[in-house]
């Protein structure tokens, strides 16, 4: 803003700032229109339709796309979210603890899991751990393994989000609670954390969206036709029929979930903006 | 026995010594006002009495219990001392009623009905009972501060601390809060009040402490400290506070 104002007086002789803005906007629209036109004209539309919207192939995808693949994606994501949420909150509290050992542990945990690609975590869970601990079994088989592996990935981000949320609650809230005789723990539980949760709802919903997409990594653990999820399901069908339509369907299924969530996030953020 | 007795209180933040040996007493039923320039340590003194700050040395005794004793239960000590903050600090996520009941229930273990009875009683006392179901953000500053006073009173404190309770208020809302405090004083509540409201100090205080640079420079009845200060620093401060033109420095 202020930048434009600084430049303004110099160029005003030729074109008013408002006029210049109009011209610049017009140029941007023209570029956009040209790009769209180029793509539309250069594409082989027949091939596109056959490859991405083949109705016969699409029929083959149902109902399993919904009853198995989407269902499993939702289960993987939500269970991992719950694990990540609880772990994240615990790690965030440890991060803010007055005990240095806890702080150090929490910091190391966050840095490690935030720095590792989700794929690597899954590979460790899929191949590393079974070899290292042959007797190790997670409850609910595949579902349990995914909940823990994906949950660990999510927990590092969530811990940082929780920490920021807790620190965003004004100090006076804790002091007022303590001045009424509440212990530190009681004040955290009854006063600070409930307010922090409100603050972090938008970023935590974003994390849910990310997790939906990361759940596609489950395939590295090896899935059966019953434990498959959207990406793997779509990919397998696409290979089988040498046609991309199932991938489009799988993509659409993700969007059916993530788009409304994204809308919710924007609404919540707008609300919080207003409340301030 | 004094309600609050402070002996040789020292408090530093790092290398900055903020309280340099404070001696003061508040007798039971007395109102003591603390005045002094910004940064003189008034808030810190109050926060020490509530153990929101740990003193470096010195002794604070509240109704015979030494709260600075290492073995003293801090939470129990705080329960007996109510505190009202400049920024109100109402719990934003709770209704006015819940603001008043939560500590009664979680700390004093009162049952819900009893806690609500006490809460309503105190809300009526400060004149905001009709706002019991509202959230703090829906209240004016004056109403919020009166709720904060009612919240502290609901714990049945032996002493009330006020840290510039009207400094964050629009001028037209100051009166309603001072009115509540005046009534509280009339009822015999023991109060330690940091304030810039000289009129209030003059009329309500039994004793005025003038602090500057971490020490109590002068203390006595308001007729003496405010009306006829002996110390040069007190005179300078009062001249600045009472004369609205040189007030802006
Ligand atoms: N937590 C803290 N850490 C470091 N320094 C602090 C802290 N709290 C207060 N101080 C410093 O201690 C000094 C006294 O602060 P205090 O808030 O007690 O003054 P005050 O008399 O209440 O002033 P005011 O009228 O502005 O409220 C100030 O210099 C302040 O910067
Ligand atoms: Mg202060």
Image (spheres, coloured by chain):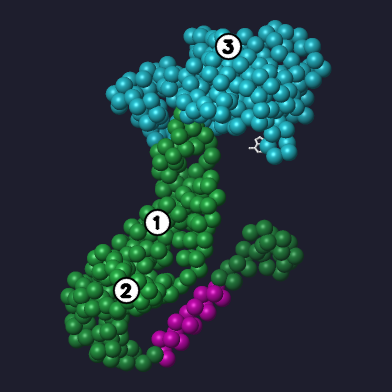
Label 1 sits on a secondary structure element that is: helix
> Magenta stretch?
A26-42
Residue A78 to residue A219: above or below: above
Q: CA distance from mark 1 to mark 3?
A: 50 Å
- Indicate the secondary structure of the residue bearing disc 3: loop
The residue nearer to you, when weighing A81 against A62, is: A81
Nearest the viewer among A170 and A130 is A130
- The answer to whether the residues at label 2 and label 3 have Cβ atoms under 8 Å apart is no
* Placement of the N terminus of chain B among the 4 image quadrants: top right
Distance between mark 2 and mark 3 Cα atoms: 71 Å
The chain holding disc 3 is B
* Label 3 beta carbon less than 8 Å to ligand 1: no
Q: Are marks 1 and 3 on the same chain?
A: no
Furthest toward the right, the residue is B232
- The chain that appears cyan in the image is B
Which residue matches tag 3?
B2
Chain that is coloured green in the picture? A
Disc marking residue A87: 1
User: Which badge, 2 or 1, comes first in the chain's sequence?
Assistant: 1
Could you classify mark 3 by the number of other residues whose Cα lies within 10 Å: few (under 14), some (14-19), or many (20 or more)? some
Do residues under tags 1 and 3 come within 8 Å of each other at their CB atoms?
no
For residue A230, what is the image quadrant? bottom left
Q: Which quadrant does the C terminus of chain B fall into?
A: top right
Residue labelled 1 has its Cβ within 8 Å of some atom of ligand 1: no
Per the rendering, the mark at residue A134 is 2
The residue located at (65%, 11%) in the rendering is B207
> What chain is tagged by disc 2?
A
Q: Secondary structure at mark 2?
A: loop
Q: Position of residue B26 (x, y in %)?
A: 60, 13
Query: At x 60% / y 21%, what residue is drawn?
Result: B60
Task: Let me know if residue A167 appears in the view.
Answer: no
Q: Is residue A270 left or right of residue A249?
A: right
């Amino acid at each position: 803003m202020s930048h434009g104002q600084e430049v303004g007086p110099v160029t005003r002789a030729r074109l008013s700032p408002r006029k210049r803005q109009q011209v610049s906007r017009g140029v941007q629209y023209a570029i956009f229109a040209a790009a769209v036109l180029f793509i539309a004209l250069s594409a082989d539309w027949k091939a596109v339709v056959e490859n991405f919207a083949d109705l016969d192939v699409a029929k083959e995808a149902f109902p399993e796309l919904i009853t198995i693949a989407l269902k499993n994606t939702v289960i993987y994501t939500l269970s991992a979210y719950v694990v990540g949420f609880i772990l994240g909150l615990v790690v965030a509290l440890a991060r803010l603890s007055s005990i240095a050992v806890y702080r150090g542990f929490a910091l190391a945990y966050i840095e490690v899991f935030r720095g590792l690609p989700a794929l690597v975590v899954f590979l460790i869970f899929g191949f590393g751990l079974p070899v290292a601990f042959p007797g190790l079994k997670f409850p609910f088989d595949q579902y349990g393994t995914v909940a823990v592996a994906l949950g660990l990935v999510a927990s590092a981000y969530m811990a940082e989000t929780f920490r920021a949320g807790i620190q965003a609650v004004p100090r006076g809230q804790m002091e007022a609670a303590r001045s009424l005789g509440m212990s530190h723990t009681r004040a955290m539980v009854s006063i600070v954390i409930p307010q922090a949760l409100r603050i972090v709802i938008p970023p935590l919903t974003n994390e849910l969206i990310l997790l939906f997409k990361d759940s596609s990594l489950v395939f590295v653990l090896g899935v059966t036709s019953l434990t498959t999820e959207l990406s793997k399901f779509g990919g397998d069908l696409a290979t089988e029929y040498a046609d991309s339509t199932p991938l489009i369907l799988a993509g659409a299924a993700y969007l059916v979930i993530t788009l409304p969530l994204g809308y919710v996030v924007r609404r919540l953020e707008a609300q919080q903006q207003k409340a301030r | 026995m004094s309600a609050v007795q402070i002996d040789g209180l020292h408090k530093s933040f790092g290398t900055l010594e903020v309280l340099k040996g404070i001696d003061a007493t508040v007798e039971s039923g007395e109102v003591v006002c603390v005045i002094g320039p910004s940064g003189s340590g008034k808030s810190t003194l109050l926060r020490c009495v509530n153990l929101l700050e740990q003193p470096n040395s010195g002794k604070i005794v509240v109704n015979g219990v030494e709260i600075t004793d290492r073995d003293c239960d801090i939470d129990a000590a705080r329960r007996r001392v109510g505190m009202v903050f400049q920024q109100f600090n109402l719990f934003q996520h709770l209704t006015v009623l819940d603001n008043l009941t939560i500590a009664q229930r979680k700390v004093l273990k009162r049952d819900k009905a009893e806690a609500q009875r006490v809460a309503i009683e105190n809300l009526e006392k400060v004149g905001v009972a009709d706002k019991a179901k509202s959230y703090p953000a829906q209240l004016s500053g004056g109403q919020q501060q009166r709720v904060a006073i009612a919240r502290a009173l609901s714990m049945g404190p032996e002493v009330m601390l006020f840290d510039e309770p009207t400094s964050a208020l629009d001028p037209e809302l100051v009166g309603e809060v001072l009115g509540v405090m005046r009534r509280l004083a009339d009822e015999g509540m023991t109060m330690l009040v940091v304030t810039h409201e000289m009129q209030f100090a003059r009329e309500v205080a039994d004793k005025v402490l003038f602090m500057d640079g971490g020490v109590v420079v002068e203390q006595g009845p308001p007729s003496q400290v405010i009306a006829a200060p002996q110390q040069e620093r007190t005179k300078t401060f009062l001249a600045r506070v009472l004369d609205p033109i040189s007030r802006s420095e």
